Image: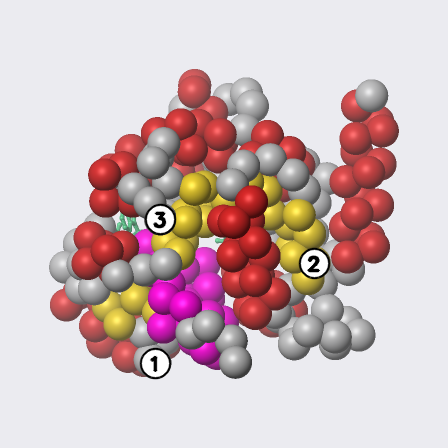
Amino acid sequence: MQNEGRLAVLGAGHVGPVIARLALRAGYRVAIATSGDPEDIALITELVIPGAQPRWASDAIADADIVVLAIPLHRYGELDPGLLTGKIVVDAMNYWPASDGVLSAFEDGGSSEIVARRLAGSAVVKALNHIGYHELEDRARPAGAPDRRASGLAGDDPAAVAAVAELTDRLGFDPVRLGGLRAGRVLQPGGPVFGQVLTEPEFERAVYEDARSLS
Ligand SMILES: NC(=O)c1ccc[n+]([C@@H]2O[C@H](COP(=O)([O-])OP(=O)(O)OC[C@H]3O[C@@H](n4cnc5c(N)ncnc54)[C@H](OP(=O)(O)O)[C@@H]3O)[C@@H](O)[C@H]2O)c1
């Protein structure tokens, strides 16, 4: 029997509710939070994510095994690293200057590496960031489905990577482990798989060909 698992999804915009719905379907217990009062999202949660618990972010985090960051990157500085200490944190965020504004710290390199430095007491795994929310919902398939697609992940903590690979699999995608957080740069905007919904062999080929073109 699969471990039930407790998930906190921070962010109730576009992608947060999709991740929450998929996770509920996969048997996780799911709490969802914004930066504000859970009362404000109670009705919409009941309607569009039935079964999810709207909670204050701090309470959702405290009770979770895995916390998903589905908030705009320019707001990640609002997160209290102390609350997230000891948690597995899925960084589903992207640096998107059109909506985040220009953030000089994120102009080069890996956004999740910067997030992980701030959340130093957490095991940060970059995942669920490179597929658009519509496709995430529409293309999720059970394990073994012939048209199943891949979703990449990367992190420095092997146990956290294993937990997030299981999450990815249960949500409906073949998890492709890329290596440490730095390797997750291929999942970012401008990378070879960003915005792509590929099968596992196609995904691996795209990453491999990108690495060859850079070498
Ligand atoms: N849209 C996609 O298809 C997609 C797919 C994969 C990954 N992503 C990434 O996921 C992130 C979110 O994208 P989105 O399109 O879902 O954004 P969005 O529609 O703007 O929603 C953002 C949500 O985050 C909440 N939020 C903001 N600051 C917060 C905080 N400190 N604590 C808790 N909740 C907070 C907002 O609520 P309040 O302002 O009320 O707090 C809102 O519910 C982005 O980094 C994006 O690149 C997006």
Is 10 in the magenta?
yes
In this view of the protein, which residue sits in the foreground, 178 or 42? 178
Q: What amino acid type is highlighted by mark number 1?
A: Pro
Q: Quadrant of the C terminus?
A: top right
> Label 1 neighbourhood size at 10 Å, few (<14), some (14-19), many (20+)?
few
Q: Is residue 27 above or below residue 114?
A: below
Residue hosting label 2 = 150
Q: What amino acid type is highlighted by mark number 2?
A: Ala
**x, y (%) of residue 111?**
49, 31
Q: Is residue 43 above or below residue 129?
A: below
**x, y (%) of residue 89?**
41, 47
Write down the region rendered in magenta.
5-29
| Residue 50 marker | 1
Is 11 in the magenta?
yes
Q: Quadrant of residue 54?
A: bottom left
For image coordinates 77% across by 40% down, the residue present is 207
Distance CA(mark 2)–CA(mark 3): 25 Å
Residue hosting label 3 = 87
Regarding residue 87, the answer to whether it shows in the image is yes
Q: What amino acid type is highlighted by mark number 3?
A: Lys
Q: Which badge, 2 or 1, comes first in the chain's sequence? A: 1
Q: Which badge, 2 or 3, comes first in the chain's sequence? A: 3
Q: Quadrant of residue 206?
A: top right
Give the structural element (helix, strand or loop) at label 3. loop
Do the residues under discs 3 and 1 have CB atoms within 8 angstroms?
Answer: no
Distance CA(mark 3)–CA(mark 1): 25 Å
Between circles 2 and 3, the one closer to the viewer is 3
**x, y (%) of residue 70?**
40, 51
**x, y (%) of residue 200?**
77, 57
